Image (cartoon, rainbow, N blue to C red):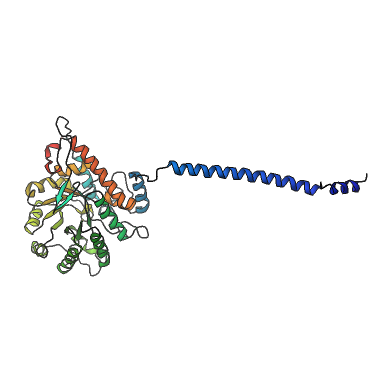
Amino acid sequence: MSKNNLTEDKEDKGFSRRDFIKNISMGTAGAIAMATLAKTDKLHANEQTKRIDEPKNQPLKIEDVLKKARERLYPKCRVCHECDGVACAGEVPGMGGIGSGQSFKNNFIALQKIQLNMRTFHDVKKVNTSITLWGEKLSLPVLAAPTGGTTYNMGLKGKMTDDEYIDAILGGCIMAGTIGFAADGIGDPIEVFEIRLKAVKKYNGKAIVTIKPRTQDEIIKRIKMIEQAGALAFAIDIDSAGRAARALPGQTVEPKTPKQLKEIARSTKLPFIIKGIMTIEEAEMAIDSGAAAIVVSNHGGRVLDYTPGVAEVLPKIADKVKGKTIIFADGAIKYGTDVLKMLALGADAVLSGRHLLRGAVGGDKEGVALMINKMKSELIDSMVLTGTSDVKKVNRKIIV
């Protein structure tokens, strides 16, 4: 049989070389396709099982909040493990302390030096952490300090808006059973102040609003706006007077005389808080001027370099004015033990700034509430282990 005949014979039977290769290829492709489908089905089945097994609502974790805050705030804030003012020294505007950063560092150091006496021979098994401020009951003596400047201090442009930030602070505080301060920024136009007041109104006035030490007319104008928003009280952070050089045109800030402070106090029925007290003399002058409360504070070390830490001056001030006015204190407060220390030194309540700022940036309202509730848990533990039954009855016997 000739070669040609053999070829023709195979072609007649459907076994050409081309068809043979084609059939093998199709078979291989089909096998691969079947294997791929089987693998895909297995992956889908595993994913479905994973979705069923996973809890639907994962609890928010502190480490996740801090990680997100670090990503958003860097390089304005490194979200250091301990907020001691070292890495951010001199970064103003920003989150650091002014100049050498020593005032910020002094706040941290002064608080760290205070040690607690542990006592376990007592009958204190349950403690009371609640206080009442101007008719508002709070679950613990911790309030969010006034923090602002989302763009120029925090570097959050395009990441978090002013209205999102203030909503996180005030809303998170309420979730945790307390209240927060709404800030007033030298670098902020009146529209930003109005945004914050809308948040205050949204939360039924459960907030304290801060005003920079502007001209008298501007302060009284803002007090009227605060009254309309229904806020619990208002404050003037008089220590911001030193930042006049950084005020925008038309946004004058200035020191105040006792006479001017009296004029402000008499212009409203709202409780008036003066923030930025660091001496006995000015604490007494604030009371004489009509202040319902003072905040012992060096503005987080952001306005004057080389001031003492708040925990250093607080006891002397409290010895003179305790009971005559409400005493708040701030400065590097992060833990429940920090709260107890400040109460033992004479404060009635404390303000926490950078710590809750991180909660807001890293976890919105839930992040703020998480931070506050952690402080509350730590406060309860430290009260039991120092034999302290009530935050309103803390004394200096519990500190070394």
Image location (x, y in percent) of residue 301: 22, 52
The residue located at (78%, 48%) in the rendering is 19
Residue 31 versus residue 190 in the image, above or below = above
Above or below, comparing residue 65 to residue 254 in the picture: above
Q: Quadrant of the N terminus?
A: top right
Percent coordinates x, y for residue 148 in the rendering: 27, 58
Residue 46 x, y percent position in the rendering: 51, 42
**Residue located at (37% from left, 57% from top):** 159
Residue farthest right in this picture:
1
> 168 and 73: which one is in front?
168
Which residue is more in the foreground, 72 or 100? 72
Residue 225 in sight from this viewpoint: yes
Q: Residue furthest top?
A: 121
**Whether residue 115 is visible:** no
**Residue 103 position within the rendered picture, expressed as x and y whole percent measured from the top left:** 21, 50
Q: How many marks?
A: 0
Q: Is residue 223 left or right of residue 198?
A: left
**Quadrant in which the C terminus is drawn:** top left
Lateral position of residue 64 relative to residue 300, left or right:
right
